[in-house]
Amino acid sequence: MNKMTGLVGGGVAAVLGILGLIFWGNSFITILKGGIPIILLWGGIISLVAGISELKETSKAGKKQD
């Protein structure tokens, strides 16, 4: 795929996206209202798991030095 095809494809996608937001804006907002809390929930869970894992690794490293 050459550069011009990507440029034209990107332009068409942007125009279709704008038209979609104009005609289905309320549906888009409804999806955001339902999706954002789920994304935040998953992000929080992943952060908690990563933090707990890091604490365990730090604890193990501290015991090895003693």
Image: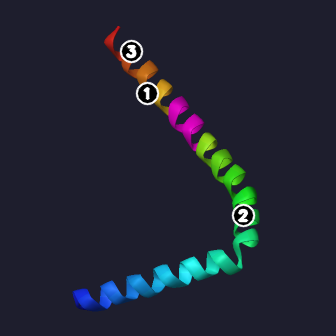
Would you say 27 lies left or right of 15 here? right
Magenta stretch: helix, strand or loop mostly: helix
Mark in front: 1 vs 2? 2
User: Which residue of the protein is positioned furthest toward the front in this rendering?
Assistant: 22
- The crowding category of the residue bearing disc 1, from other C-alpha atoms within 10 Å (few below 14, some 14 to 19, many at least 20), is few
Quick check: marks 3 and 1 in contact, CB under 8 Å? no
Give residue 4's position: percent from left, percent from top: 26, 90
Quick check: marks 3 and 2 in contact, CB under 8 Å? no
Give residue 12's position: percent from left, percent from top: 45, 87
User: 20 or 59, which lies in front?
Assistant: 20
Q: What residue does disc 1 label?
A: 57
Q: Amino acid at mark 2?
A: Ile
User: Which residue of the protein is positioned furthest toward the top in this rendering?
Assistant: 66
At mark 3, the secondary structure is: helix
- The crowding category of the residue bearing disc 2, from other C-alpha atoms within 10 Å (few below 14, some 14 to 19, many at least 20), is few
Q: Which mark is residue 29?
A: 2
Q: Amino acid at mark 3?
A: Gly
Quick check: marks 1 and 2 in contact, CB under 8 Å? no
Would you say 49 lies left or right of 6 here? right
- The crowding category of the residue bearing disc 3, from other C-alpha atoms within 10 Å (few below 14, some 14 to 19, many at least 20), is few
Q: Is residue 46 above or below residue 65?
A: below
Would you say 27 lies left or right of 44 here? right
Name the residue: 63% across, 42% down: 45
Q: What residue does disc 3 label?
A: 62
Q: Quadrant of the C terminus?
A: top left
Q: Quadrant of residue 48?
A: top right
Name the residue: 69% across, 80% down: 23
State which region is magenta. Answer: 46-52
Sequence-wise, the earlier of marks 3 and 2 is 2
Q: Is residue 45 above or below residue 62?
A: below
Sequence-wise, the earlier of marks 3 and 1 is 1
